[in-house]
Amino acid sequence: MATQIPLRNIWLLFLYAADLVHFKDQLKVAPESAKDLPELVARLLVHVVELRLRRNLSKGYKPRHAVLPRVRGRIDMLQTVTGQLLERGRIACSFEEHTMQTPRNRLVRAALDHLAVCVKDAEVVHACKSLSNAFGRLGVGQEKPSRTEMAADQIGRNETSDLLMVNLARMAFEALIPSEQEGMTNSYKPETTPHLVRRLFEKAVANALRIKLEPQGWQVRAGRRLSWPITSASGNVLPYLPSMQTDIELTHYLHKRKVVIDTKFTHIFASTQYRDEVLKSGYLYQLYTYLRTQEGLVPEKEWRSEGMLLHPQVDGVFDEHMDLQGHRMRFKTIDLTCSAQDLEIQLRNCL
């Protein structure tokens, strides 16, 4: 794709992909002030962390077991008696202790360290390193938390400051920010890092649809694995079957409607020996397979299952559909080079 996408629109995709669009008005950083997306994210994270440190980081609890001169928490009677601790004026206790060493704080420090390596601007690098050291002085370690630890560290609805900080930190590790970028001062060339922009495009569309459609009763799921409706098979064929995973799946149980959306960050057309423009057969067959293999898994016969191939717009608007064996298949493009306001409207209204 030769089309250049303005960095401001890449930034808008990033906000949707990171589920930060609700904070858009709070993030007063112009995309043009940064040389590339990693620097922009680093500047934002530095700004948010600095504000957070002024009000102290959130604390957590960690279990501790210690022999103390007074009771704290629960008494460990077995150790106290067998160790004859009472005769020495001591008692074994199990209790929880306040700590800054929480998974969310460790994630943010790890993100600061990671961005300090990715970013070229010396001032931003210095700020990331300084804030990382500040976390260290508060007792926050450098080790990145596991997914299990982060899942256990749930952020409450009232902890919006932590939510913004943690979501920005997550993006540094989700393969959405590469470690090296070139030529992004005024625009972003998708061919430079196609994986980055493809992931942004996919996640941005999913979150934009979730914001728009969930209040209307839709369930929006991203990345759901589908099963092959196999009735019988030889013993060794199953391990060799390709997996099927949708990009975005929309379900409305009241209306008995299901829509499978496949986002493709490529030109919607290919060329052949006989035609200059033709829909790409591989993508078409893939979407058709998603729809037909899942027919028997929907118990209600009156359910409508639809599919959509969603591509960036290159040479002109394309929005067409066809009905095939009871399934509507739609082929649509989104203009990523328009104004940020128009792009946001397209993202939310692409269904």
Image (cartoon, rainbow, N blue to C red):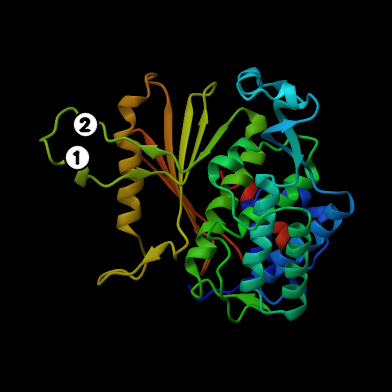
Residue 111 quadrant: bottom right
Q: Are marks 2 and 1 in contact (CB under 8 Å)?
A: yes
List the residue tagged with mark 1.
238
**175 is higher (above) or lower (below) than 238:** below
Residue that label 2 marks? 230
In this rendered view, identify the residue nearer to me: 57 or 302.
57
Which mark lies nearer to you, 2 or 1? 1
Corner quadrant of residue 87: top right
Q: Identify whether 245 is placed above or below 63.
A: below
Amino acid type for the residue under numbered disc 1:
Leu
Residue drawn at x 41%, y 21% is 302
Left or right of residue 5: residue 101: right
Given residues 140 and 312, the one toward you in this image is 140
Residue density around tag 2, few if under 14, some if 14–19, many if 20 or more, within 10 Å: few
Residue under the image location 21 percent in, 31 percent down: 230
Q: Residue at x 25, y 72 (%)?
A: 273
Q: Secondary structure at mark 2?
A: loop
Residue 271 in the image, given as x and y percentages of width and height: 33, 69
At label 2, the amino acid type is Ile
Instruction: Please tell me how many numbered marks the rendered image carries.
Output: 2
x, y percent for residue 178: 55, 68
At 66% from the left and 40% from the top, the residue drawn is 211
Question: Which quadrant, please, contains the C terminus?
Answer: top right
The image position of residue 126, as x and y in percent, is 76, 74
- Is 320 left or right of 284, judged from the image as shown? right
Mark 2 to mark 1 CA distance (whole Å): 10 Å
Q: Which residue is most to the left?
A: 234
Badge 1 element: helix
How packed mark 1 is, by other alpha carbons closer than 10 Å (few <14, some 14-19, many 20 or more), is: few
For this orientation, the residue located farthest to the right is 54
Residue 45 is left or right of residue 206, and the answer is: right
